[in-house]
């Protein structure tokens, strides 16, 4: 929970640091979050590898003096990573959503597995769209727009998608 809250606040932190011309301080919470993520023993090898690669890319960008680019494109990188994880699971089941569902429900009937596959596909589309918007905002380089979208709007859209999926799932359960 604390990790999620910290991740939500990173774009706001970055915007404030950039606004006050303290760019050198901006990546600190990202680095801490990635190291904390790596220390999590419950991560799969794919998640652990992505976190390690993220840390490496951030450190290389910082050492190369590309702090601003590393920060601007960080949301693009995260969306690409999530797309790869979710997309990979479509070809090598169980899908990510099926894994989450099994954590909450245990065994799933065949219809539920088909449903979780469709939900995983929807999330893949979301990551493509969200990553595309994040890429465009990074390309434009407007920190205010970047902070608004990556620090609020994107999370609102994720929440909306979660809410819609929950409503659809209730209807699917009722009809089965």
Image (cartoon, rainbow, N blue to C red):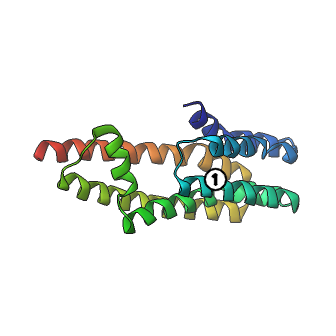
Residue most toward the top? 2
154 left or right, relative to 95: right
On the question of residue 125 being in view, the answer is no
Residue 113 percent across, percent down from the top left: 25, 55
On the question of residue 169 being in view, the answer is yes
Callout count:
1
Residue closest to the eye, 117 or 27: 117
Quarter residue 142 falls in: bottom right
Up the image or down, 151 lies above or below 76; here it is: above
How many C-alpha atoms fall within 10 Å of the one at disc 1: few (<14), some, or many (≥20)? many
Residue closest to the eye, 8 or 139: 8
Q: Residue shown at 70%/48% (left/top)?
A: 144
Residue most toward the left? 175
32 left or right, relative to 102: right
Label 1 sits on a secondary structure element that is helix
112 left or right, relative to 64: left
Residue 100 percent across, percent down from the top left: 38, 46
Residue closest to the eye, 139 or 113: 113
Q: Residue shown at 33%/52% (left/top)?
A: 98
Residue 58 percent across, percent down from the top left: 76, 56
Up the image or down, 118 lies above or below 26; here it is: below
Q: Residue shown at 49%/60% (left/top)?
A: 85
Which image quarter holds the N terminus?
top right
Residue 86 percent across, percent down from the top left: 44, 60
Q: Residue shown at 56%/60% (left/top)?
A: 81
161 left or right, relative to 142: left
Judging by the rendered image, the residue that carries numbered circle 1 is 51
Quarter residue 62 falls in: bottom right
């Amino acid at each position: 929970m604390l990790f999620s809250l910290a991740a939500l606040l990173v774009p706001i932190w970055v915007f404030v640091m950039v606004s006050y011309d303290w760019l050198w301080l901006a990546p600190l919470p990202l680095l801490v979050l990635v190291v904390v993520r790596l220390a999590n023993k419950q991560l799969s090898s794919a998640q652990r590898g992505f976190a390690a690669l993220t840390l490496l890319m951030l450190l290389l960008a910082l050492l190369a003096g590309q702090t601003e680019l590393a920060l601007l494109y960080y949301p693009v990188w995260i969306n690409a990573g999530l797309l790869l994880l979710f997309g990979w699971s479509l070809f090598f089941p169980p899908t990510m959503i099926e894994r989450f569902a099994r954590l909450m429900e245990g065994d799933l009937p065949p219809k539920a597995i088909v449903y979780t596959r469709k939900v995983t596909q929807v999330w893949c589309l979301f990551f493509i769209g969200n990553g595309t918007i994040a890429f465009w905002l990074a390309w434009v380089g407007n920190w205010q727009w970047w902070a608004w979208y990556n620090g609020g709007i994107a999370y609102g859209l994720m929440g909306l998608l979660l809410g819609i999926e929950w409503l659809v799932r209730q209807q699917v359960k009722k009809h089965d």
